[in-house]
Amino acid sequence: MKADSASHEPLGSEQPEQSKMMPTNAIRRCAQPVLIALACAAGLVGYAVVPAAAFAESKWEAQSVPSTSELTELEAVSCISTSECFATGRASTALTAERWSGGKWTQQTVSSAGRAEDVSCVSATFCLVPSGGANFVHWNGTAWSEKGYNAAEIPVGAKEFQLKRVSCVSATFCMAVGGYKNASGHERTIAEKWSGASWSIVATPSEEGEKALNYLLDVVCTSTTSCTAVGSEGSKPVALRWNGTEWTVLSAPATTLGRISCSGPSACIGLGSVGYQTTEAWDGTKWTSTPVTQPEGSVQTTIHGISCVSASSCEVVGEYSPGIINADVTLAEHWNGATWVVQSTPNPFGEGMSQLTSVSCVPGTSVCEAVGYKREHVGAAKTFALRYE
């Protein structure tokens, strides 16, 4: 989401259409049932149910995104509505942010160093971004600032402390997850809750042992009493559920999940962290594995982001290689409840090392925003955004 005269018009040629586009809607990385009853149960009361035909008529189009650095990479996006989204990433060694408002992308000033791999927005006046270690950057409606939000609690003796992902449901409730090494050098999972005034640690399970790999890779909350976190515990996949009081262990997925999107306690889809080619769907009882669809001619497919609005409507984005070195092209696929369907996506700067890193869909609409970048040469990148409408 960057460029000089941020435009909503296509910038370049599209890949050959491989299937009809059938999108989804979602908050950040969430999934929501199409049935009204399930939508209400998942906390989407007030959102309209969008007919499937509306999705079939939509398509991905490129948007320009302003950038002042050749080293800019957008890595996360969060949409509050069809007219309000925020994207974050890095520009050289500094954190960068872009805002979609008024029909265009605008680059914002962020004074913090670091790399913003995640962003969670609940309104036009509240977004939170993990910026490295125990630090966070906050959007207050007029400016980005670390003041008041960058003091996450650090366990005594902790080393390599890192909160990587965050999910907010309001300005007074966020959950952040990650990991650290204790005084003995053993890895431990970490989760912290934002109360609106301060961060506090909430206990999470970690397997004991010097070689145990304990780390939480992602979290998504659909309410103050329902969060799902995924990662590894003792070198095994782990999924945890927050019930408003404590974290409990769910049955484990078949593979470690690096991303997760939930619409409610019984509707989640995660991305396998090894190769990001497999998805795991949680129905409240068990996980079911489904590989993403390989585009025609692909020799390598990688998925980076997921956003869903129902158990039968999700969107994933990433890239695939047609077998030519340094020729990766953008990829988007839609989950229809049974399979992943490849969609046609543009490559704003032409084919070659282009990738989509994150996607956010808006509940009750057929609109999604995806962000990404294209590598030009070593160390340089051009950012762009795609809109599904």
Image: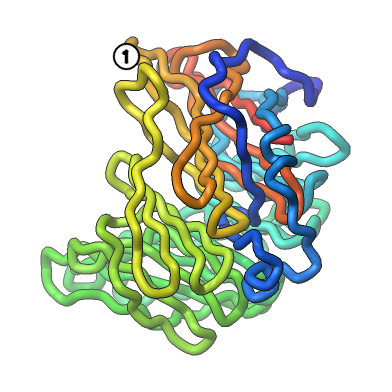
In this rendering, does residue 161 appear at all?
no
Q: Quadrant of the C terminus?
A: top right
- Give how far across and how far down residue 58 sits, in percent: 71, 33
Work out which residue is located at the far right of the displayed protein and give it: 102
Work out which residue is located at the far left of the displayed protein and give it: 210
The colour scheme of the drawn protein is rainbow
| Left or right position of 258 against 256 | right
Residue 27: name its quadrant: bottom right
Residue 140: name its quadrant: bottom right
Q: Is 381 drawn above or below residue 57 in the view shown?
A: above
- Give how far across and how far down residue 358 sits, in percent: 54, 41
Q: Nearer the viewer, residue 147 or 198?
A: 198
Q: Amino acid at mark 1?
A: Gly
| Left or right position of 234 against 16 | left
Q: Which residue shows up at 37% across the image and 30% down it?
A: 294
| Label 1 element class | loop
Q: Which residue shows up at 63% across the image and 11% down it?
A: 13
- Give how far across and how far down residue 257 sits, in percent: 35, 55
- Which residue carries the number 1 mark? 323
| Left or right position of 67 against 48 | left
